[in-house]
Image: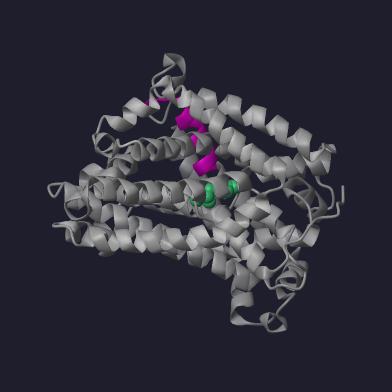
Amino acid sequence: MAIDRGQFSSRLGFVLAAAGSAVGLGNLVAFPVMASKNGGAVFLLVYLLFVALICFPVLLAEIAIGRHTRRNPVGAFTALSGGSQGWQLAGMLAILTPFMIAVFYTVVTIWILIFLFRTVTGGLDMLATASAFPEMTGSPGIFPWFILLQVVVFGVLLGGVKGGIERLARVLMPTLAVMLIGLIAFVLTLDDAGLGVSYYLIPDFSRFNGGVINAALNQAFFSLSLGMGIMITYGSYFNKNDHIVGSGKMVAIADTSVAFMAGLLILPAIFAFNPETNPDDLSTSSVGLIFTYLPQIFLSMQDGVGYFGASLAAAVFFALVFFAALTSLVSILEIPISYMIDEWNFSRKKAVLVQAVAVTVCALLASLSFGMSPGLTSFIDYGGGTKSLFDLIADTFSEVILPLVGLFACMLCATRWKEGFVDELTDGDATFKGSVLQRYLSFSLRTFVPVVLLFVFINSVAAKYF
Ligand code: PFF
């Protein structure tokens, strides 16, 4: 159903909203873990190449599809394919994926919230111990935090205070960047941090393998919020007279810069605190890595600023990370909500309430998979091991499905909407048509981008499940 949509008031409005969605736990938590697991500098190099050569064209394709059709992903895919049911199903995947991502994202956001609370209440030294993270994830003490977080998230979605959140993001996002730079400068002064800098910035090509390709592409998709309907939905609010390409560039650069900085903070810290670290052992790292090293970084400031100063710095940082996660979470949930409003004629209130109940129930179940429920902790066997419900959701929806939905978006542009796609990108900048970039985008989306996405999808299925 065609709908009368609101629009971003300016190009900057789009860039800030899209960057607010893109910059989140994917950059600050997942990226450093992925980089440390997958060979450091080799991962970084492949990641940067993928962002520039593969993800940027997909980002523009998704924004263009959204702006042209002014619909949610299902409506957009159906409209562009001339009503095909197969494409409608592909669009459904772009609704289900953000919902499932919101489920495990909610759990990780709660961990950040608990870290913030414990830091504020004087427990920074306790958080820096190796047992703090598993104790937190495996204890029923996290349940009340669900209520608090869901009241905030769904309050924002219902109360129409998103404008306020976006205004706040203008101040808090740059603050996060400045704080990251300050923290990096501090960590780089620590003994042995140089070992981590080398691991992160000097490629050792013997560490390159198929797993690095998969990990880098999946991480780049997740980080840029691709393959999950979000950029299509944001594109549908994008002003007709603004230039998609320039805005896309700003979003990609902002997102990649934050991820790069998070890596430059955490990897040197790993080596500074454990100089005997063998990079080969990092291949088994998990998110617990971040939750252990971040408190250690702050705690090591004690000599200079005292325990109170270190705790204050940690609290400000966790608050900023929480805010980045909140803007992402609000944006993820907007996808299934706008779908229900557009296609099922739900009122906003009803759609928000249905989503609130569904996400809370699923996220509670996922949170039980850290030891509280044996059945959900050892939920299913695949990929050579027993996995929890949380693992199953995270593996499937943050890795395997993303390149597939990206592939659908490219195929739609390449087969059903060739000329229209270029015209859509040309709106707002007449010099774009015929430029080298335009020719690169048209060529890449028709040739190697879908091939790489298909390859990574098949490879991820094989590597994850078999
Ligand atoms: N890109 C966000 C991050 O890197 O944390 C995560 C995210 C945001 C996922 C929005 C999905 C989404 F719709």
Task: Say which of 361 and 64 sits in front.
Answer: 361
Query: Residue at point 51% right, 39% down?
Result: 105
User: Quick check: 69 left or right of 462?
Assistant: right
User: Residue at 39% of width from left, 22% of height from top?
Assistant: 139
- Name the foreground residue: 450 vs 155: 155
Do we see residue 385 in this rendering?
Answer: yes
Q: Position of residue 207 (x, y in %)?
A: 27, 54
Looking at the rendering, the stretch of residues picked out in magenta corresponds to 385-400
- Compared across the picture, whether 11 is left or right of 122 comes to right
**Residue 287 in view of the camera:** no
On the image, the x and y values in percent for residue 7 come to 76, 61
Q: Nearer the viewer, residue 321 or 253?
A: 321
Residue 396 inside the magenta-drawn segment: yes
86 vs 231, left or right, is right
Q: Quadrant of residue 414?
A: bottom right
User: Is 85 left or right of 121, judged from the image as shown?
Assistant: right
| Most frequent secondary structure within the magenta stretch | helix
Residue pushed farthest bottom?
Answer: 431
